[in-house]
Amino acid sequence: MFEAPIPGQSLTTEPKNSPWENPSEISDLGDVIKYYIDKLSKEEVMDDIVALLDLDVPLVPLVEGLYMKGVMGGVHTVDSGILAAPAMHAFISSAAEQQGINIKEEAGDADRRAEEKEKERFIALTMKYMETVEEEDAGTDLLETIAQDFEDAPESDMMDIEMSDEVEEPVETLEEEPAPTGLMSKGL
């Protein structure tokens, strides 16, 4: 991990000193795929990869690590590695499937985590607001119902929550902003 080049290192060392600064050993995409399939076909290599997948290591970063090691070693170019990645992914997936291992594709879903944080923030802000309200009305009842629905709903049902139609009119209307004028407001 700490053996990676530091930023600007290539500017202070002799040019073509690192493997990735030289022409790659393999330039044909078919040969790059064959290189990885041959490497992954070895029993001692596949046993370790399947053991990692059994420990819930995600497959996509594992494949990316494999081809980036080849890039850093000067075996092939980055684009050849990216193009060979689906073949490596399919090969490893089929080997793990034959072993009866469920594969975790990605490390995590960033959108789902962001949605969960936003839901928690909404609930916290709603509860904080509800503590300051002196008199409850239809609007506060609606907010309390929505917050309660968010707390009670399982993750898979979050998209199925529908808002009730208790509020007839908006409490506050927004005024329209005047159209911008000036040199920069003109469209191209």
Image (cartoon, rainbow, N blue to C red):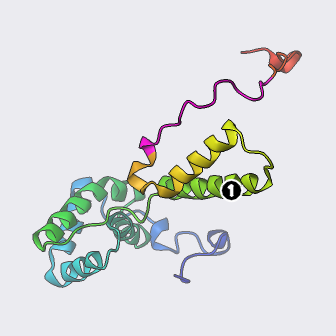
Q: Position of residue 50 (x, y in %)?
A: 22, 77
Which residue is rendered at x = 12% and y = 74% of the image? 99
Which residue is rendered at x = 21% and y = 55% of the image? 30
- Does the stretch in magenta take in 163? yes
Residue type (three-letter) at the residue carrying disc 1? Met
Magenta stretch in the rendered image: 159-174
Mark 1 = which residue?
127
Q: Position of residue 121 (x, y in %)?
A: 64, 56
Toward the viewer: 8 or 83? 83
Toward the viewer: 149 or 75? 149
* 177 left or right of 75 in image: right
Q: Quadrant of residue 168?
A: top right
Which residue is rendered at x = 45% and y = 72% of the image? 19
93 shown above or below 1:
above
Toward the viewer: 35 or 142? 142
Q: Main secondary structure of the magenta part?
A: loop
| Callout 1 crowding tier (Cα within 10 Å): few <14, some 14–19, many ≥20 | some
119 shown above or below 176:
below
The quadrant of the rendering that contains the C terminus is top right
Q: Is residue 31 visible?
A: no
Which residue is rendered at x = 25% and y = 78% of the image? 54
User: Which residue lies most toward the right here?
Assistant: 182
Q: Quadrant of residue 5?
A: bottom right
Q: Quadrant of residue 45?
A: bottom left
Q: Position of residue 108 (x, y in %)?
A: 43, 63
* 54 left or right of 77 in image: left
- Does the stretch in magenta take in 44? no
